[in-house]
Amino acid sequence: MHETERHRVILAAVQARPLATVAELVDITGTSEATIRRDIAALHVQGRLRRVRGGAEAINPPEQGALMGRPFSVNETINIAAKRAIARAAADLCKDGEPVIINGGTTTYQMVHYLTGRRLSVFTNSFAIAEHLIHNSRNSVVIPGGTVYREQNVILSPFGGVVASHFYAKRMFIGCQGLGQHGLMEADPMVVQSELALINQAEELIVLADSSKFSGRSSLILCGLDRISAVITDNGIREEDRAMLEKAGVGLTVVEVGEQGKSQSVA
């Protein structure tokens, strides 16, 4: 990650919570502790944040608590060509009349552009996905009750949800913080709690993850590889990651990302 982008991510993370620790910023940016400490020092000198013991805080602290992880506005600009191609392949799996769950995320959000002509019953905890489908399609849209977390554009409730517990789907489409031999990883306990309830409401769990997610790491495991039906990723996937999924019996779709970010072929 380039320094300018890294600084943007750090500032967004700091603004989204009362205190961002060095360890949290290392996870979010995928860089070293030494690099994060240098970045914090530089931004402190510039007066853009306040350096404190163990991390950094905003000059004007946020009023509402926020979730761990990069904000939606930052994430949606990263690997956008791959995300669009992956989302197109995911949308191709949807059949008119089917109930589906589309979890909040910047890759899953890209599915909306390919679902405008469909007639699906869509359950989503993404405010952005719901809003787009309501205004630009004739899909039926169901959302849970809870708090809207603006930075991630999702709706979450610490108490679960009656609607979610009664919505049954053929497939659930989900993004992730990281994907490895231990399974699907997420950054925030609140997100994990919400997603655990949802993944049990679908027959198939389809993970949308660009190839960089195989290098992503977090201390929070949402589910093991044995719960994942299939992964859709791009042609940057490493051979060892292909082998890991094959060994676990996880289906794999690889999209070739062209210059325009379109799915040229599927393997």
Image (cartoon, rainbow, N blue to C red):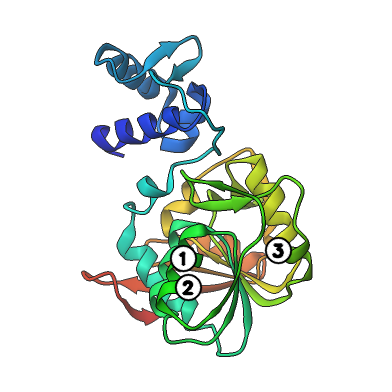
Q: Give coordinates of residue 60: x percent, y percent.
A: 40, 21
Q: Give coordinates of residue 261: x percent, y percent.
A: 28, 69
Secondary structure at numbered mark 3: helix
Q: Quadrant of the N terminus?
A: top left
Q: Is residue 265 left or right of residue 204?
A: left
Local crowd at mark 1 within 10 Å, few (<14), some, or many (≥20)? few
Q: Is residue 160 left or right of residue 232?
A: right
Q: Are marks 2 and 1 in contact (CB under 8 Å)?
A: yes
Residue underneath mark 1? 131
Which residue is pictured at 47% across the width and 47% down the height? Answer: 215
In the rendered view, tell whether residue 201 sits above or below residue 154. below
Q: Quadrant of the C terminus?
A: bottom left
Q: Residue furthest bottom?
A: 96
Q: Give coordinates of residue 105: x percent, y percent.
A: 49, 57
Q: Which mark is residue 189?
A: none
Residue underneath mark 2? 134
Residue underneath mark 3? 199
Q: Amino acid at mark 3?
A: Ile
